[in-house]
Image: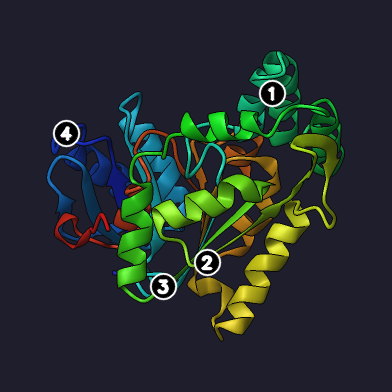
Amino acid sequence: MPQILTLVAPPGGLDAALLPRLRDALQALGASTGAADWLAPEEAVDLPFDGLAAEQAVAAARAALGEAPVDAIAVPAEGRRKRLLLADMDSTIVTSETLDEIAAYAGLKEEIAAITRRSMNGELDFRQALIARVGMLRGLPVSALDRTWEATALTPGARALVATMRANGAHCTLVSGGFTFFTGRVAALVGFHAHYSNTLEIADGRLTGKVGEPILDRDAKLATLKRLAAELSLPLEAALTVGDGANDLAMIQAAGLGIAFRAKPVVAAAARARVDHADLRALLFVQGYRAAEIRED
């Protein structure tokens, strides 16, 4: 079977009774299907299929699943395991938008968060929105960054994603429109090989309200993907990218496996693959990793 449809749910949330319904839906469209292969009991399963485009298979799966909190992603059977990972940070590897959380210490969280939402949904130019938001924080003490970091939480599955891919020879990079103050700490905590992001200018212990140049935006994320792939002598097909915002969309669309993770509507609609319900371990299951192969460190 040349393609694999992977179903992933939060632990304990995948009912085997869904499989006959799914198989019937695929076969009704002319697909042939193989035997189901459980990667993790009640959490992830592979269903090989042939004779149907990946987009059709995913659409049929979502229709068959109805309101069940299950993600469905179809990939070619060959080359499933990727050798390069580029991951966004805010609302992807960590659960929050760190700039919005910094803004809370200036009493501007709601105002800045509203700009962030519009930027991440592609309604505002990322560069201009970033400059405007950081400008509003001029004079804020650096201690606000430390307090924000103390409250920052990793997304479930983040450590497992990076540890497992690293153990299998993949190069793992954090690429963010956020700031080095956080990406450096997240990279060290999670185990990324490298991190790329923006720089907050600081003088006399306070934010100046300026962002260092050059600004890492949507185009820079795509350029980073292409540069790293070239440096590692890998085709883009061997890359996995993941993010949630409009500034991630170019790299998501360019990679062999690009995943919109709990993404903004414009990103979820445009990405070939998306994860709406499961945690970041879903990115391992989609690559064919079994539960017993997943590492935490």
Q: Residues within 10 Å of mark 4 (few under 14, many from 20)?
A: few
Q: CA distance from mark 2 to mark 1?
A: 36 Å
Dot in front, 4 or 1 = 1
Compared across the picture, whether 190 is left or right of 122 comes to left
Give residue 12's mark.
4
Mark found first going from the N terminus, 2 or 1: 1
Q: CA distance from mark 4 to mark 3?
A: 29 Å
Q: Is residue 160 depicted above or below 276 in this figure? A: below
Point out the tag, 4 or 3, that comes first from the N-terminus: 4
Q: Give left or right: position of 2 versus 136.
A: left
Query: Are discs 2 and 1 less than 8 Å apart at CB?
Result: no
> Is there any visible trace of residue 29 in the rendered image?
no
Most foreground residue, 208 or 288 = 208
Residue hosting label 1: 103
Q: Answer with mark 3 or mark 1, whichever residue precedes in sequence.
A: 1
Measure the C-alpha gap from mark 2 to mark 3.
14 Å
Three-letter residue code for mark 1 = Ala
Residue at label 3?
Answer: 170
* Secondary structure category for the residue under label 4: loop
